[in-house]
Amino acid sequence: MHFVYLIVLVFVMEGQVAALSVGVLRPRLGRVAKSSLNMEYELVHRITPLFAAQLTACASTVTAGFVTAAQEPAHARSTSTLEEEFDIYRDSLLRYAGYLNEIGEAFRPLIPSIFVTLSYVLALTYVFADGVSKGIVSGNLTPDTPGEERNFFNSQLGCTVAGVVDTLSFQLMASIAFPGFIINR
């Protein structure tokens, strides 16, 4: 059954979604499902080295996440008082606005390009709003330091900028760039 999913993924990645609707894929799926150990040469041949490298990178990233989470001590997983506060960008349905560009990319062949652009604008709005929110929170948590020891890096402005840059860099990569590129390819 896993080979069937791989074949469908190959067809979608190759841009041959039309083959699914006209029934070209059904005979091939039947043959592969009957002999799941021996895939046809032409289906295996369509997996390019670039596609194989992308699949390997995705699989290794997911595996590294599971391994890291399994090795994390139990006390590190407990919530602190800062994490118990309600965060509208993390704890509400608004968090799914960060995935709007993936929806736009997934439906790119089916919808007008203005909707794809709009999906990116909405996802970027969410990312920037989340970055500003996290920057303000980190700036408010800055401890007071005496005037002679204060510099940009331990001031409220410095901590706010650091929070914004940290959140924006992560969110832009994790919510916009990587998923959008992978879905587009």
Image: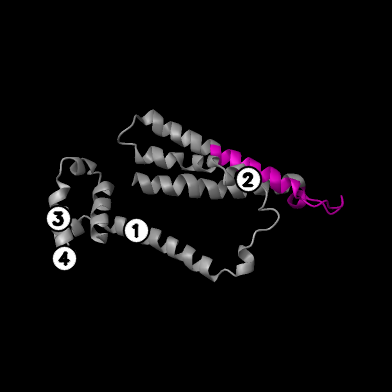
Q: Position of residue 33 (x, y in %)?
A: 18, 59
Q: Residue at x 53, y 43 (%)?
A: 95
- Predominant secondary structure in magenta? helix
**Crowd around label 3: few <14 · some 14–19 · many ≥20 (10 Å):** few
| Marks 4 and 3 in Cβ contact (< 8 Å) | no
| Marks 4 and 1 in Cβ contact (< 8 Å) | no
Which of the marked residues, 3 or 2, is nearer the chain's N terminus? Answer: 3
Spatial CA distance of label 4 from label 3 is: 13 Å
Spatial CA distance of label 2 from label 4 is: 51 Å
Spatial CA distance of label 1 from label 2 is: 33 Å
Q: Is residue 151 magenta?
A: yes
Query: Mark 2 = which residue?
Result: 87
Query: Mark 3 = which residue?
Result: 30
Query: Mark 4 = which residue?
Result: 38
Which of the marked residues, 2 or 4, is nearer the chain's N terminus? Answer: 4
Q: Position of residue 79 (x, y in %)?
A: 65, 59
Amino acid type of the residue tagged 4 in the rendering: Asn
